[in-house]
Amino acid sequence: MPSMAQNGRVTTDFKQSNQAHNSNAFARREEIRQQRESLPIASVKERLIEEVKKHDVLIIVGETGSGKTTQIPQFLFSAGFCREGKSVGITQPRRVAAVTVAKRVAEECGVELGQKVGYSIRFDDRTSGVTRIKYMTDGLLLREALLDPYLSRYSVVIVDEAHERTVHTDVLLGLLKNVQKKFPPLKLIIMSASLDARVFSEYFGGARAVHIQGRQHPVDILYTLYPEKDYVDAALVTIFQIHLEERHGDILVFLTGQEEIEAVERLVQERLRQLPESNRKLVTVPIFSSLPSEQQMRVFMPAPDGHRKVVLATNIAETSVTIPGIKFVIDPGFVKARSYDPAKGMESLIIIPTSKAQALQRSGRAGREGPGKCFRLYPESEFEKLEDSTKPEIKRCNLANVILQLKALGVDDIFGFDFIEKPSRAAIVKSLEHLFLLGALTDDCKLSDPVGHQMARLPLDPIYSKALILASQFNCLEEMLITVAMLSVDSVFYAPREKLDESRTAAKCFASPDGDHITLINVYRAAEDLLEKRKWVPHTERNEKIFKAKSEKIFKRWCKENFINGRSVRHARDIHSQIRGHVEQMGLRITSCGDDMLQFRRCLAASFFINAALKQPEGNYRAFGTGQVVQIHPSSVLFQSKVECVVFNEMVQTTNKYIRNVTRIEYMWLTELAPHYYTMQS
Ligand code: CDP
Ligand code: MG
């Protein structure tokens, strides 16, 4: 059990969290009205509207949970900012936030989602011609700018959670600054939770900043006495320690990703079964970005009577999503972040310690409704060593995607673009080089026609967009669509620690000796068969319903037996149908290579040639582009195989450098299919 050192006073004065659950619609409306009125922002409504009227650029800073995201768009609507068919657009760095907030605001307005209030995120659009308050991801608004450079359908654009400094937010700010110079009627509001508004204000030439006072109750911070070897285990122990020793109040645990969250969910269930019946009143609710949207709202629902809720979240719950009822926060102190090495041109996801600012935001989540406690699963001395704030994403990611979009928007001089914080020259050069290798740019660094333009239209990583374009020439677009969809979701297989052998045996029945891409196709097609094969039933409405219910049940059982993550497969199906729509619109030929997997593998080689690796005498692989020594990840079907040459999609760094999603190819194909790269190398 992690031993906790107490820092600060012990609070005994718990306030009952107000989660009265009313089934009655009238009571629910009344409850919402009261909640809205009690938000700190409610008392400054008129003042805020005046400020927006007076200033074309306004910066609003306010404590998380004060009501910025849900209320300000409604204030603007009621003040007449949506006349003449114009809308208020609000960007969020995260999909989940856009979706959950839009649902909440639709409910507050008493309208159906997709009517007056809607959201739009990649692969999921819930808006219509009458939508006037539109929540969306920052990436999506950037895409809209491709079609409507002056964002003329908006009267106000709100860039929310600007302190997150995602690469899309940073680029969007640059773009909006430009648009506003040329198209002054567009109002711009920048909202942020952190207290440092100066950087935004200076960037917009000394723009006006207003601060909204929040309410924050005291939070006791507890640290462990010693560093924890296994933070997942420490989190688990702390959950049960709180559950068994503390009075009521929900728990929020910060984890790094879907797999970790799902593992903790299972472990909590297992430990609960070992407790006496009376102590089992604990429910877990996950929240992470790829969670299907119908499940996302569960975090906002109160736990059943007498139960305690444990929310297992990624850093989504730091600022983007405010969950009511939280009294205890467990913070292992880690976050999954993108990292980019421009010298090697390699982007990877790594788990790193949070910054001090993040740790403070996380602990603050415990004190929204009353005094709370935050359990940091590291010693206090470690806190002092954390970075003050998180490095903007633009400084630690591959810029190929962003550059492609900027070029499509007519910004040719990337070095001269007015970024709020400039990415390094080396990173820009490397990303331009990358796009050039993919054939997206001409010799004079303009978008190539048609490839570059087609790539910019697809809402995918450039390397995947290129793979789809090539696949239509290789007659395997059907296979590549599935592959790209499956590569766009979190891991499809799960391997619980306690059932490692069983899960590996199950995975073998999908495994292709050629590698992971074909294996993913096998899983996808098997799932599709289960969910759609309806040969044996005549088509009637009733049969359709029965079939759906039956196939859902069979699918669930199949997922369980095969250790397959049903959520990921469903998500992939969804993405598949959307990208299919895009490529159809672009007029690409969708055909299948049938059993000719050689053709498909050649297409993989032609697409992912930048990520190829050759076996070394001592058994490791050496990546061509970067010269790095890598190993095939244990989760790959080619782990411990003896194949000579491979292409891969991802590199992860733990104790070793691993490559994931790997397929066997012939070395000769590389010089044949990517001579511009491979003759250069030799
Ligand atoms: O943006 P900011 O952090 O200032 O606050 P907000 O997201 O507008 O949240 C205001 C209030 O709405 C909070 O008390 C949330 O608990 C509540 N809320 C909710 O109950 N359900 C949602 N889906 C979103 C917000
Ligand atoms: Mg907010």
Image (cartoon, rainbow, N blue to C red):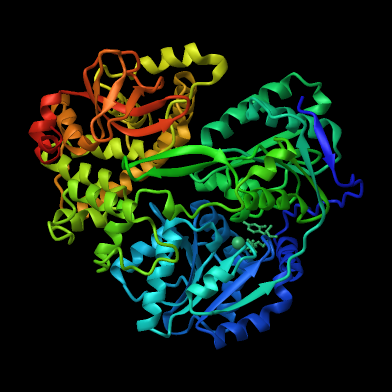
Rendered residue at 40%/58% (across/down): 139
Assign the N terminus to one quadrant of the image: top right
The quarter of the picture showing ligand 2? bottom right
Q: Quadrant of residue 195?
A: bottom right
Q: Is residue 588 left or right of residue 166?
A: left
Which one is nearer the viewer's eye here, 667 or 90?
Answer: 667
Q: Can see residue 161? A: no
| Placement of 393 over or under 484, stated as above or below | below
Rendered residue at 53%/15% (across/down): 499
How many tags in the picture? 0
Residue 115: % across, % down:
48, 67
Q: Residue farthest to the right?
A: 12
Q: Is residue 319 left or right of residue 408?
A: right
Q: Residue farthest to the bottom?
A: 54
Rendered residue at 37%/55% (across/down): 424
Rendered residue at 42%/40% (across/down): 571
Assign the C terminus to one quadrant of the image: top left
Q: Quadrant of residue 490?
A: top left
Which one is nearer the viewer's eye here, 634 or 289?
Answer: 634
| Placement of 346 over or under 162, stated as above or below | above
Q: Quadrant of residue 249?
A: top right
Which one is nearer the viewer's eye here, 631 or 130?
Answer: 631
| Placement of 549 over or under 85, stated as above or below | above
Q: Is residue 3 left or right of residue 160?
A: right
Residue 232: % across, % down:
63, 29
Residue 470: % across, % down:
15, 42
Residue 541: % across, % down:
39, 42
Q: Can see residue 145? A: yes
